[in-house]
Image (cartoon, rainbow, N blue to C red):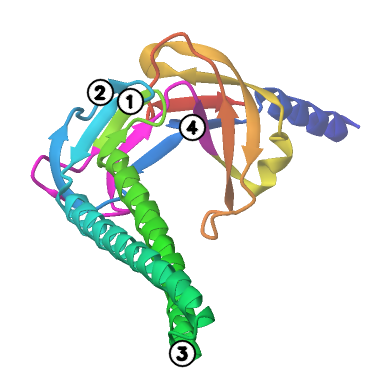
Amino acid sequence: MKLWILFFTLGTTLSAAGLSLSGSVFSDNQKIITSRNMGFVTQVNVSEGSRVRTGDLLYTIDSQEIDSSRSQVESAISQAQLSLQMYENQYQNVNINLERNKRLLQQDMVSRYEVENLELARTNLLNSISIAKHQVQQATARLKEVNNQYRYLRIVAPNNGVIISKSIKVGEMAMPGMPTMVLADLSDLKINVDVAESNLKLTPIGRKVKVSIPSIGYVGIGTITSVIPNSNPTTHTFKVKISFKARQTVYPGMYALVEI
């Protein structure tokens, strides 16, 4: 009986003590900024630690490559329009000659062969006009696409946040898809902790937990928002995310404590 009471007392003490975990703050809306076009960086308006708002200009890329493409497309449009005008003029002339030769045929002054040749020429010119119009439309659409690329030379902030990493300088070559900056949204911060497999039962989604960030003296209540179903094969721990709200300025990477 005494032994049973001892075990019960120890179990109550352990349950009351709960689970204390250490982790770090991170932004759950962290974006890697990249360029869509290749070109030399002509201007950089931010540095690491800069706070930006949605739409703020981060950096710009030179337009030399797009300028060349636009020049080629504009030349293609001019050639297509010139061909169209030429075919339309030829069509008008052939149509006039055809109508005149039809009248002459009624008077037996020209052969039917000549009239048929003019009718064939008119049909061919109608086809050529249709093709030329299509070429003008295609080239015009291509010009619109090229002009649309100019807006991708101005890389702007997709949301409010702070620049936590920058790897681009004026004069360097920006490559499509290569990271240039990292933008962290400070309004969507969470705490990341590693929880042992045996303790997962203590971390159901939605549970309220005590969180603290010693460096700024913050103590508050957080909520478990997700448990990542992918364990570390070495430590057999799972990532658990905890949301919280703080009035103080909190930065990604800060040390945090969580009590469950």
Q: Which residue is mark 2?
A: 50
Q: Which residue is mark 3?
A: 111
- Give the SS element for disc 3: loop
Question: Local crowd at mark 4 within 10 Å, few (<14), some, or many (≥20)?
Answer: some
Viewer-proximal residue, 128 or 150?
128
Q: CA distance from mark 1 to mark 3?
A: 84 Å
Tell me which segment is drawn in magenta. Answer: 166-193
**Residue at 59 percent of width and 47 percent of height:** 238
**Residue at 33 percent of width and 25 percent of height:** 162
- In reply to whether residue 222 is colored magenta, the answer given is no
Q: Is residue 130 above or below residue 248?
A: below
Q: CA distance from mark 4 to mark 2?
A: 28 Å
Q: Residue 123: in sight, yes or no?
A: no
Q: Which residue is mark 1?
A: 162
Measured as percent of width and height from the top left, residue 236 is found at 58, 54
**Residue at 49 percent of width and 13 percent of height:** 246
- Give the SS element for disc 1: strand
- Give the SS element for disc 2: loop
Question: Local crowd at mark 1 within 10 Å, few (<14), some, or many (≥20)?
Answer: many
- Between label 1 and label 3, give the one nearer the viewer: 3
Give the position of the C terminus as an image quadrant. top right
